[in-house]
Image (cartoon, grey):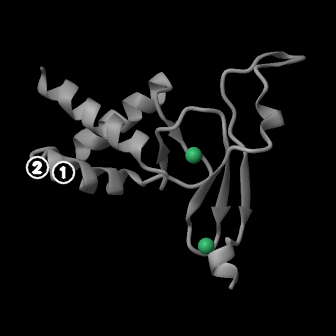
Amino acid sequence: MKRNTVQKKTIRKYLQSVKTHPTAKQVYLEVRKTLPNISQGTVYRILKNFKAKGDIHEINSVTNRYDGDLKPHSHFICDKCNKIFDIFENNKINKHQCKFGKITSSQVYYHGVCNKCNK
Ligand SMILES: [Zn+2]
Ligand SMILES: [Zn+2]
């Protein structure tokens, strides 16, 4: 297998395995454990490439956070600890069709303070 293919596979697998919505830097640090020779530039380039192809989502309201879960879902973002939570319930907004056309993806963000920070 080509080196580039292995790198891409590793990054995609990592993103699909976590629920943390990691930053590009976190992706780099994590992937480096398996691929010690990978450079930060390569990781950033692959992430950009994935994003352009629609293989991953970039959380638009927070810079450089990525999501490997492509199932339609919304996000709750804690403004205190910056954790991002997936909301899969209440997905009425994510119908495949609306009166303007076919919906292929959607991103909804709810900002607030999570239960842990609210204590
Ligand atoms: Zn919080
Ligand atoms: Zn998510």
Q: Quadrant of residue 15?
A: top left
Q: Residue furthest top?
A: 101
**Where 90 sits versus 99, above or below?**
below
Q: Residue at x 65, y 33 (%)?
A: 72
Pick whichever, 42 or 68, lies toward us.
68
Q: Quadrant of the N terminus?
A: top left
Percent across and percent down for residue 115 are 68, 74
Which element carries disc 2, helix, strand or loop?
loop
Check disc 1 and report the residue beneath it.
32
Give the residue at x 83% y 35%.
92
> On the image, numbered disc 2 is attached to which residue?
36
The reply to whether discs 1 and 2 touch (Cβ–Cβ < 8 Å) is: yes
At label 1, the amino acid type is: Arg
- The quadrant of the rendering that contains the C terminus is bottom right
Q: Residues within 10 Å of mark 2 (few under 14, many from 20)?
A: few
Q: Is residue 71 left or right of residue 87?
A: left
Where's residue 70, x and y in %?
A: 55, 32
The image quarter in which residue 42 lies: top left
**Residue plotted at (66% across, 40% down):** 73
Q: Residue at x 18, y 51 (%)?
A: 32
54 relative position to 73: left or right: left
Label 1 packing within 10 angstroms: few (<14), some (14-19), many (20+) = some
Provide residue 52's location: percent of width, then percent of height.
47, 27
Q: Residue furthest left?
A: 37
Amino acid carrying mark 2 in the image: Pro
Residue found at the very far front of the displayed protein: 89
